[in-house]
Image (cartoon, coloured by chain):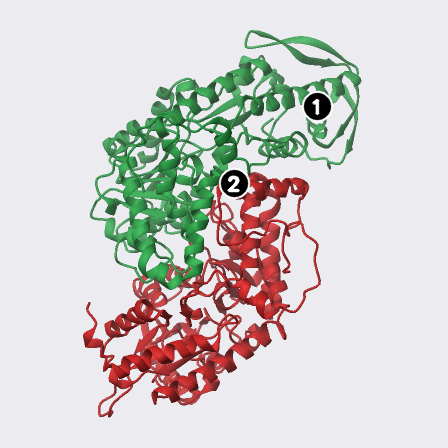
Amino acid sequence: MFLSRSLHEPLSATTSSSLSSMASHHHQNGDSTVTTTHSPPSKKLKPTPITPSELLAEFSHHQPSTARINNGSFGSCPASIISAQRNYQLQYLEQPDDFYFNRLKPSILKTRSIIKDLINADHVDEISVVDNATTAAAIVLQHITWSFFESKFDKGDTAVMLHYAYGAVKKSVQAYVTRAGGEVIEVKLPFPLKSNDEIITEFKKALEKGKSNGRKIRLAVIDHVTSMPCVVIPVKELVKICRDEGVDRIFVDAAHAIGCTEVDMQDIGADFYTSNLHKWFFCPPSVAFLYCRKTDKVADLHHPVVSHEYGNGLAVESAWIGTRDYSAQLVLPEVMDFLSRFEGGIDGIRKRNHERVVEMGEMLAEAWGTHLGSPPEMCASLAMVGMPACLGISSDSDALKLRTHLRECFGVEVPIYYRAPNDGEFNPITGYARISHQVYNTTEDYYKFRDAVNKLVNDAFTCTLLSD
Amino acid sequence: MATQRNQNSSFITEPQLREEFAHHQPLVARINNGSFGSCPASIIAAQRRWQLKFLQQPDDFFVNHLQSRILHSRTLIKHLINADDVDEVSIVDNATTAAAIVLQHVGWAFAEGRFQKGDAVVMLHCAFQAVKKSIEAYVTRAGGSVVVVHLPFPLSSTEEIVVAFRKGLARGKANGSKVRLAIIDHITSMPCVVIPVRELVRICREEGVDQVFVDAAHAIGSVHVDVKDIVADFYVSNLHKWFFCPPSVAFLHCQKSPVMPDLHHPVVSHEYGNGLAIESAWIGTRDYSSQLVVPEVLDFIDRFEGGIEGIRKRNHGAVVQMAEMLAKAWGTNLGSPPDMCPSMAMVGLPASLGISSDADASKLRTHLRDHFGVEVPLHYQAPKENEIEAENGDRDSLITGYARISHQVYNTVDDYRKFRDAINQLVQDMIKVLQRMGCRPINKTHKGQNHEGGVKIDSSKAVGKDFGAWPVFLLARLLPERVTGVVTLGVPYSPPSPNT
């Protein structure tokens, strides 16, 4: 059926006896003699196109009663990849010393090589594997802290970021930049958006501010795909503007990007670029890459969890940060096999996701008499759909409560964004749902959401009815 | 989940115990629980249930389950270690992460002028390498100085440690530096001994050390842990080493103090500023499942007589017994008295193996893994000048290699016999090699004990293959007048370490 290993077992039930039987399978296959190869012992079959029933089986562990239209938050992972991951976990548990000395590093290097090719980087040294974009942000920003303390930067030098930057990144900027004496300039973006020009205009304004009074802009933090509200940012253009304006370094937070938009390091041209592989690239939780462009200016980046490899380069440091489970970082070869079973591979997947999410977004907007938050070309595999104004979403808290209500009473999982209305807006749309589309989604998921909201509207529901 | 002790007497049976660890590679004598720990099958199964729960509906898991389960784990740990308040207990990946948290805090203090350039951090010479690097990254780089305290090894008593520590600390303060932080291992890694932390913490307080961080990576499940008794400012231990948790999970205990709000997890996320424990409970999307199985682990431990106390006492008894068996078989000794051994012991390796550098120890370790199916870390201990004199300049009798053997519930006597026999085999192989060079076997005495296995050579060419190359190189360097030529197969020549 799948590219199954001899250790494949249904995800639904694991007992202690099945673990040891998996282990004995392993021994019978002579795995104890496998030395340096990363891949578990199994014949490499030519990938067969995935059938609808196989696809269903790959995601059969998803809760069937939930319309799961929020792939953007936590991603998703097919059963065969989970199985591959468990294989690595088991190899470690069987003989951890052997795994550590003989298998771990080559496996991580293989992962880095695959990523390098995926994102069109020049050299594998430029690719580090870390837990998630949050960790990548800490790495880049801690470097900024040291630059302030080692007097490479002056107090008051600025960092520019989007107002819609991810909450965790904003905190990291506070923890590492503001605390070290840097000043932070936020780029206010309008929402809803009509075009890239709106973003570019605001960005240029922010850069002006950042350079005012003779200050230097030391860092620009730019999202590739913002989280909430979700739009695709024209990063290539913004990076160019940064270069023209003499911004020291550019960090693109592309948590969503890989598997969801085109990702090409030569094309985008940033200094640092991070993306999560567990969101749209079918990896288990959690694994991300941080790309650091090789330049003449040596950027002295370090993983904040310092271990034996300190000083050997970020990629090597990140590959050992103490005893832990690195298995999520090792399954990229299996993921590439999985992707090859889809027409057009990852490019085919993301194009179809994009088309479907726009189609579903427009279906919902029409059903509710609302609109999309941005034009389709600014949507990736996610779209912001206006929610009926009569629902009375009037705060972040309302949005969260409505989301909970949809989860608990309607079995719909979708994040909702509150947008404060502008002065003078008549009957404003203040709530937008961020719908995602991934290969496991069906039209029924979105009909379920449509009908839930219609019911709320028909029942004259407002958020004031929701308790705290 | 039951948190009270199991009252009935149906303890885990032998077959059940074997099944719990049936996933361990059967061909390997796994006597290195200290490095990576171990996890029973029923705990792995429990972990997978949590992993599945996340995969099934991650939003629901995140919103409704994760934080309450982490709090539950923290509460159980609080009871385990006799902490006062659950706020004092944070869960992190491992001791390495905890060290980064504490040391980054020190780095900020230098950068923000609360500490002055040159203020010192004290560490033991045998501190874990990752911690040494962390000190370099956060203290030295920020302008702090580092005082290194050497502890003797081998040891005959805890008094030697106390004396050495006092001296080292005094020397460090001699130039008037203020000591901002002392990092003390509860159980050193290599060489492995139990440190009298309570006393050393007291000495630190007497000597005006600002804060004390106890790196107790090995401690929980292996020695008694009572944070109110030890009274350090920071105390970290890994739960995946000796406490049956899956990789990886550790707790960092922080005494309530004015500096507590300034401790931060270096991976900053939404909860920044809400206290270290809350920050650490969310550092971005990842798999937190290993942190959630503490209740199941306590249930597992309850199935053993005496619970964790019983386990660690029996481990200690067994590892000492096995160490003494090995020392007797090899004509060597333990590196410390039994009461300074936790669930691990340092056993001297026969001098005739000629371990003369860290590289030698590492190669022998690999050789034991690859050719004998024995997994055990080895430590190279450079001999001191007075030791060499005591042996009348005869370096060949000095013990320069120690094996760190561990004992956990899954180990059997056969594991140690396998190791014993492997070393005996290697020694015999070496004797044969040297005999063929024209050697005459002699009875050497080592510390008054007659022990066969010494050799005396006239002169000859020496041929060494793989690991056999090392003693051959050593021989050629030490006794050039006896070796007319060297042939090496498989290993390029490299000179023995200058310490030899």
What is the letter of the red chain?
A: A
Q: Quadrant of residue A388?
A: bottom left
Q: In which quarter of the image is the N terminus of chain B?
A: top left
Question: So how many labels did they put on this image?
Answer: 2
Residue highlighted by disc 1: B475
Q: From this view, report whether residue B223 is shown above or below residue B331.
A: below
Q: Quadrant of residue B211?
A: top left
Q: Residue A17 carries which label?
A: 2
Q: Count residues near mark 1 (Cα–Cα under 10 Å), then give few for <14, some for 14-19, many for 20+.
A: many
Q: In which quarter of the image is residue B240?
A: top left
A118 sits left or right of B171 in the view: right
Q: Distance between the residues labelled 2 and 1?
A: 52 Å
Say if residue A121 shows up in the picture.
no
What is the letter of the green chain?
A: B
Q: Which residue is drawn at 32% across and 37% down?
A: B175
Q: Which of B485 and B76 is in front in this view?
A: B76
